[in-house]
Image: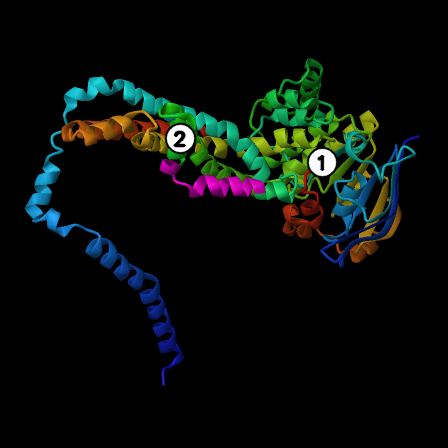
Amino acid sequence: MFNLIADNVHKSYGPDGSLKALKGVSIEVRSDERVALLGRSGSGKSTLMRCINRLVEPDSGDIVLDDVNITRLKGKALRQFRSQIGMVFQEFNLVNRMSVIDNVLCGCAGHVSAWRCWFRAYSRQDVEKAEGLLQRVGLADQRFKRADELSGGQRQRVGIARALMQEPKLLLADEPTASLDPEIGRGIMELIFEISEKSNIPVLISMHDVALATQFVERIIALKDGNKVYDGNATSVDLEDIYKDTGGSVEAAHTQHTAQHPAIQKSEALA
Amino acid sequence: MLSDRNKRILYRNGLFVLGFGLPLALSLYFILGVQTDWARMSTFDMVVKNLEKFLPPNLSVIPDLMDATLDTILIAFLATLVIAALVPPVVWLSSRNITPNIVFYYVGRGIIIISRSVHELVWALIFVIAVGLGPLAGIMALGIRGIGFVSKIVSEEVEAIDVRPIEALRATGASTLNVIILAVIPQIVPVFLGTLIFQWEIDLRRAAVIGVVGGGGLGLAFHQAMIQFKWHDAMAIVVILIVIVAVGEIVSRMLRKRII
């Protein structure tokens, strides 16, 4: 059975490594699970997410997917592994000047040749798949609009369709609702978990809102200052404790701009 | 004793005199005082009279200048194509965030500096010697001269790019090349095309000038008219240049509007 294990992951930022983002975090996600990663801004959620698909290089520790240790993969093997993990972002991370359908087709950039990408000459199969996914997220009629013409909620749906284009074995969602108003955010949560259930894709979702998390996930992992402080059943979790431990609030999410996050600046380099 | 405020004012005015007043006085003395032939100029009336030699422009020569005009327009166009072809690799080298390594980066920056710091007339003279008189030398001169400007603008745009789509593309397992194609290039295409059109407009002007040193086109015709003392013909060429540049500006504005 598929599972993802992150074992004793350490990560520091800064020239002297003084900013310790992860201080030995171990987590596990099974193929039939939906797990929420809770914690306040700066607790290490984004970094842990990016260590899992190696957008950020862990300093030490192991990432194991499907019994394969991927911690030291390089080049093509690393990209092949990444293509099996879909990712949804807080700020959608779409290519604004591209059409909606082309944004979704970016999801297959892992196995499409450069010249096909250049001419946007994707195979009929891929295009039909992308159209099907847009239908599934309710944006079939918007497919030729430019991505920046859409509303926030619609853009996140495009982001989800792009991630699904990869036919992922695991879906990472990095605060997918934090840039949206609560009502739209709930719709996005419902979409992610409906797809997860129907297509049997395990989800690891980071978020701030404990109450919202408990409505969707079976298990909660809480981080604080780079350490794991809770890992267990979502229904039996003492909400007050989590709030106290993580200081989580929706407001905190809005004050944090992801482009300034060290994990994202770190992953800025192309290699 | 001077107060702090007065000291500051004195300091500032001193700087102003040193930085601006002194160079101005020196230039006036050497350029206008020493190197200008005031005797030849004689009276103000003579200067006006000399200028009047150019008027009116002899518009009857314009039909004979159509070939040269076309040459100038084509030189500008082909030079811009050369620039369009050579800028992307230079940008790739000279943008900090996508350059393969620091040595390549300095090579790219070096190309930009050399291209920009040598005047188009100097480039034209070099290429006239390299490939002979005519439009080819002009095209190469304008091409090399323009690369630096366009590359500088575009690579600055690349360095200020939105990193979020790049992250998303990397997360799909895309190769570096595919990330550049899908997440970097779409972000810089408008600036690249806009700058290129602007460069074409500049090249129109430059194409006219470099003819003077053998780069072909209207500049050559202007030079010939001048050395034969055909002032009215020379003025007709100036009229053509004004029309070309004005039309170029209108077209450039229209095209750029469509891109943005």
What is the crowding at mark 1: few (fewer than 14 residues within 10 Å), some, or many (at least 20)? many
Image-based side of B117 in relation to A123, left or right: left
Alpha carbons under labels 2 and 1: distance apart: 59 Å
Q: What numbered label is drawn on residue A88?
A: 1
Q: Which residues are magenta?
A: B107-122
Image-based side of B22 in relation to A118, left or right: left
Q: Give the quarter of the image for residue A134.
A: top right
SS assignment at label 1: strand
- On the image, numbered disc 2 is attached to which residue? B129
**Magenta highlight on residue A213:** no
* Label total for image: 2
Residue A184 on image: x %, y %: 65, 37
Q: Give the quarter of the image for residue B212.
A: top left
SS assignment at label 2: helix
Instruction: Considering the whole magenta stretch, tell me its main secondary structure.
Output: helix
What is the crowding at mark 2: few (fewer than 14 residues within 10 Å), some, or many (at least 20)? few
Choose between B6 and A183: the one closer to the eye.
B6
Residue B227 on image: x %, y %: 20, 31
